[in-house]
Image (spheres, rainbow, N blue to C red):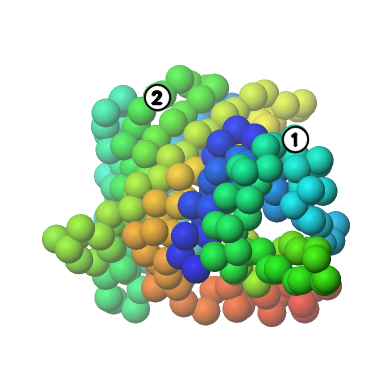
Amino acid sequence: MNGADGAAVAVRVERTLHAPPERVFRAFLEPDLLRQWIAPDDLTIERLTVDPRVGGRLEVWHSRDGASTGKFEGLFLRIDPPRELVYRWAFVGTEPEKGEYFDTLVTVRLRPAAEGQTHLSVVHERLEELRRGAPNVHVRLVPGWNNCLEKLERAVA
Amino acid sequence: MSDVFQLLAEPSRRQLLDALRHGERTVTQLVDRTRMSQPSVSKQLRLLLDSGLVGLRKVGRHHLYSIRGRPLREASEWLSYYQRFWEQGLSRMDDALRAEARARAVGRR
């Protein structure tokens, strides 16, 4: 939840990555790199395609234990390497014909940090769309995940 | 409770919740703190009451409003999933970028 900018239902993550901005930017657009991070650990990526231009799409089909869990879909709105990337980000469920499509917005900003590193901020907003469309989408997507993390947090506390 | 986020999307309601953070307040106190008009404070409070985000206790003539934690806690737990989605994703990305750099360094040798 956020402050006065109106994006009430958003998450913001900031991170310093051990690579220069040019390479971090590629990690959002190149299939070989995307495959290594875009899906939570317990999902298997079945297929991944990227059309890295404004209006182009990123599609990630995934499954768990051989059963399809649907697809992530991105639509690029702004590609300004190596500074800014904006895309619509949707979760398409296993029954897209039922209109299971939940549209959010991701804004990625990069700036160079010391020693060839990159400071990255990700703002993922319009999450209320997801909440309205599928209050439990993440439960279906990654059952037990929160629970595991809570156990982990307790273990290392 | 599915419309908690819609309620939170309105800045004036967030302002009211913020003003209630440190305990019970009367409408007059809320008007004071938020500099909103009395009718709009009352209107927004009613919506917050209906949703269960805010509770009401009557002491004599005074109506005391306070935050009810549960819906907010549920909303923040829901959001924390997406926070983790990104935090863990970016950790995997960092690992992948480092592995790529190592592979290149070996290739150059």
* Foreground tag (2 vs 1): 1
Residue drawn 75% across and 35% down? Answer: B35
Question: In which quadrant of the rendered view does residue A132 lie?
Answer: bottom left
Instruction: Return the chain for callout 2.
Output: A
* Residue in front for this viewpoint, A78 or A64: A78
* Residue in front for this viewpoint, B82 or A58: B82
Instruction: Return the chain for callout 1.
Output: B
SS label for mark 1: loop
Sort mark 1 into few (<14), some (14-19) or many (20+) by Cα contacts within 10 Å.
few
Residue drawn 52% across and 79% down? Answer: A144
Kind of residue at disc 2:
Arg
Eyeballing the image, is B76 above or below A139? above
Q: Which residue is mark 1?
A: B35
Residue B64 pos. (x, y %):
78, 64
* Residue in front for this viewpoint, A123 or B54: B54
Disc 2 to disc 1, C-alpha distance:
39 Å
Residue A92 pos. (x, y %):
28, 57
Residue drawn 81% across and 57% down? Answer: B25
Q: Is residue B29 left or right of residue A45?
A: right
